[in-house]
């Protein structure tokens, strides 16, 4: 794929024109791995992601949402693969991620070579997301009472990904939000001991402050220090090839994309990660996992 960067973790916003987002991404040479987790998180679904990827194949890499314990099966994975999805996103399962009920789904993903992005740690409140979108005048998809989803963050603890990695050694899994609150030492151990375990670094995209300058922002050293103080004890400069550039951006937010890239660069550099290794984090590891050249 002809790009400088691959953002591993991006969400499609419900009923928004993604053209300005694609335009901003193209300008910076970023390919966006886009997923949409459905009405549970006030997002659209796989159909919309597929459509966007067909329309903008140079920029949108489609990641298929799989509803664990909520009706999806190994056949769902086959279908997503046939439709051109390059990876899978999992969040809010009805049991722990490593529950054996889900093994047939993982086995199918492993067979087809589809990497999985697992949300890890405390998850945002579905009812709050819906409430906030409504308050902002943004549309929300038709949805059930969020309580019917029976969401529990403990089923998404990083340790719940470990059993998947052990039992599916050819299945590459990425733990979202590596290094942020509640996803530190355990995640580090998992990533370092499992050749098929990776982490995404969404939590380190905001080492900047908006200002009145022409570019509209500057890197703020106090935030760079705050983030490196978190990442250095995890010894991230020893395994940069296992960590992925990611922002958790929403496709209705094309602003300050370059500030987010430069935030990551400033933090990686301050952690002592050399440029050639940063290239793996910004692009090459994601390209390898997704089967993109
Ligand atoms: Zn996310």
Image (cartoon, rainbow, N blue to C red):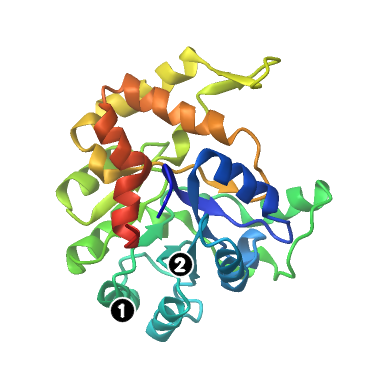
Q: Is residue 24 above or below residue 236?
A: below
Q: Position of residue 159 (x, y in %)?
A: 29, 53
Q: Which residue is mark 2?
A: 93
Residue situated in front as seen by the camera: 288 or 250: 288
Toward the front, the furthest residue is: 2
Rendering quarter of residue 187: top left
How far across and down, in percent of the image, does residue 227 sit? 41, 24
Which mark identifies residue 253?
Answer: none
- Mark 1 Cα within 10 Å, few/some/many (few <14, many 20+)? some
Position of residue 162 in the picture relative to residue 120 (left or right): left
Describe residue 37's horizontal placement relative to residue 107 as left or right.
right
**Where does residue 113 sit, x and y in percent of width and height?**
29, 70
> Is label 2 in contact with label 1 (beta carbons under 8 Å)?
no
- Residue behind mark 1: 108
The crowd level at tag 2 (other Cα within 10 Å; few <14, some 14-19, many 20+) is many
Which of the 4 image quadrants contains residue 86? bottom left
Residue at the spot x=42%, y=51% of the render?
2
Q: Quadrant of residue 163?
A: bottom left
Q: Residue at x 33, y 23 (%)?
A: 269
Compared to residue 13, the image places residue 73 above or below, namely: below
Between 172 and 102, the one lying in front of the other is 172
**SS state under label 2:** loop
Element marked by disc 1: helix
Residue at the spot x=31%, y=34% of the render? Answer: 278
Q: Earlier in the sequence, mark 2 or mark 1?
A: 2
Q: Quick check: is the Cβ at mark 2 less than 8 Å away from ligand 1?
A: no
Comparing 183 with 153, the one in front is 183
Asked if residue 93 can be seen in this view, the reply is yes
Give me the residue at 21% from left, 38% from top. 239
Locate the N terminus by quadrant. Answer: bottom left
């Amino acid at each position: 794929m002809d790009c400088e960067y691959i953002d591993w973790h991006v969400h499609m916003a419900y009923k928004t024109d993604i053209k300005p987002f694609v335009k901003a991404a193209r300008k910076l040479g970023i390919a966006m791995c886009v997923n949409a987790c459905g009405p549970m998180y006030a997002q659209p679904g796989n159909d919309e992601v597929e459509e966007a990827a067909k329309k903008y194949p140079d920029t949108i890499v489609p990641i298929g949402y799989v509803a664990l314990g909520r009706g999806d099966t190994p056949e769902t994975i086959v279908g997503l693969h046939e439709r051109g999805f390059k990876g899978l996103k999992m969040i809010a399962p009805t049991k722990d991620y490593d529950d054996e009920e889900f093994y047939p789904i993982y086995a199918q993903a492993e067979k087809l070579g589809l990497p999985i992005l697992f949300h890890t740690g405390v998850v945002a409140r579905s009812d709050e997301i819906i409430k906030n979108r409504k308050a902002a005048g943004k549309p929300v998809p038709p949805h059930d009472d969020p309580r019917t989803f029976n969401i529990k963050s403990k089923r998404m603890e990083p340790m719940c990904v470990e059993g998947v990695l052990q039992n599916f050694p050819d299945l590459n899994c990425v733990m979202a939000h590596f290094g942020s609150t509640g996803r530190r030492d355990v995640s580090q151990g998992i990533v370092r001991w499992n050749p098929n375990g990776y982490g995404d670094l969404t939590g380190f995209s905001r080492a900047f402050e908006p200002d009145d300058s022409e570019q509209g922002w500057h890197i703020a050293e106090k935030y760079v220090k705050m983030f490196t103080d978190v990442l250095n004890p995890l010894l991230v400069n020893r395994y940069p090839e296992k960590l992925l550039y990611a922002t958790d951006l929403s496709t209705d937010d094309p602003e300050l994309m370059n500030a987010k890239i430069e935030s990551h660069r400033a933090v990686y550099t301050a952690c002592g990660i050399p440029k050639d290794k940063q290239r793996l984090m910004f692009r090459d590891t994601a390209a390898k996992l997704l089967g993109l050249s």
